[in-house]
Image: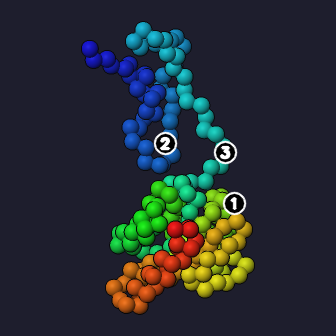
Amino acid sequence: MKEQLPPQVLAGLFNNSLVYTGEKIKTETIYDVQQPVAINEYPVELKPAPAEEKVHKPGKWYLGNYEKKFIVLVNDEYNVYLSEKELEFLTGILNACKMNLAHVALINFKNHPVQFQQMKKDLQPQFIVSFGINALQIELPFSMPDYQVQQYDNCAILTAPALVQLNAATPAAKAEKTKLWNSLKKMLNL
């Protein structure tokens, strides 16, 4: 037997929209039900949705689920996060480290110029790998050469050249990838 919800219930469930696009939706109460409505013999009382809370919750400004407290910083001015080619290359690096995008927070510094103290406050990272962004750009109180693993404020930090440079098909890029891999093994105890 097919059951159909009354129009008032559907209106209350979907608030004038079946697809949420991220935009604020203007809602209005189009019903005023005082008595419970029976659905499958179970009474349900319809009430307008509560007013939106005024608590500020920052939106997610990174890609990934951040399951391992591992931040990957990139600096790509043409893409939201990375081009498909560089994202595939980064995924290969993460796989070699026994991780994937679900384990990290990928932040494009060009679109979200986050500083170290903000990352510490908002995300409490244990690891930060920065591609094409030096320590001073994220306002660390020191500079450091690429591929040197630096401990600071309970966080292991590593800087490296931009992914586009590392992903080149040249002998120099291959040597840089080897340096990166050696540093990542040291950083992650692989």
Q: Are the residues flagged by discs 2 and 3 in contact, CB closer than 8 Å? A: no
Check the image and report above or below for 98 versus 53.
below
Q: Kindly identify which residue carries mark 3.
A: 55
Q: Is residue 44 left or right of residue 141?
A: left
Q: Earlier in the sequence, mark 2 or mark 3?
A: 2
Q: Secondary structure at mark 2?
A: loop
On residue 39, the disc is none
Residue at 69% across, 76% down = 140
Q: Are the residues flagged by discs 1 and 2 in contact, CB closer than 8 Å? A: no
Q: Amino acid at mark 1?
A: Lys
Q: Kindly identify which residue carries mark 2.
A: 25
Q: Are the residues flagged by discs 1 and 3 in contact, CB closer than 8 Å? A: no
Q: Secondary structure at mark 3?
A: loop
Observer able to see residue 76: yes
On residue 121, the disc is 1
Q: Is residue 43 left or right of residue 155?
A: left
Q: Secondary structure at mark 1?
A: helix
7 or 57: which is nearer to us? Answer: 57
Residue 127 percent location from the top left of the image: 60, 66
132 or 51: which is nearer to us? Answer: 132
Dot 2 surroundings within 10 Å: few (below 14), some, or many (20 or more)?
A: few
Residue 147 percent location from the top left of the image: 56, 81
Q: Amino acid at mark 3?
A: Val
Kindly report the distance in space between the C-alpha atoms of the residues bearing marks 1 and 3.
Answer: 18 Å
111 or 118: which is nearer to us? Answer: 118
Kindly report the distance in space between the C-alpha atoms of the residues bearing marks 2 and 3.
Answer: 18 Å
Kindly report the distance in space between the C-alpha atoms of the residues bearing marks 1 and 2.
Answer: 31 Å
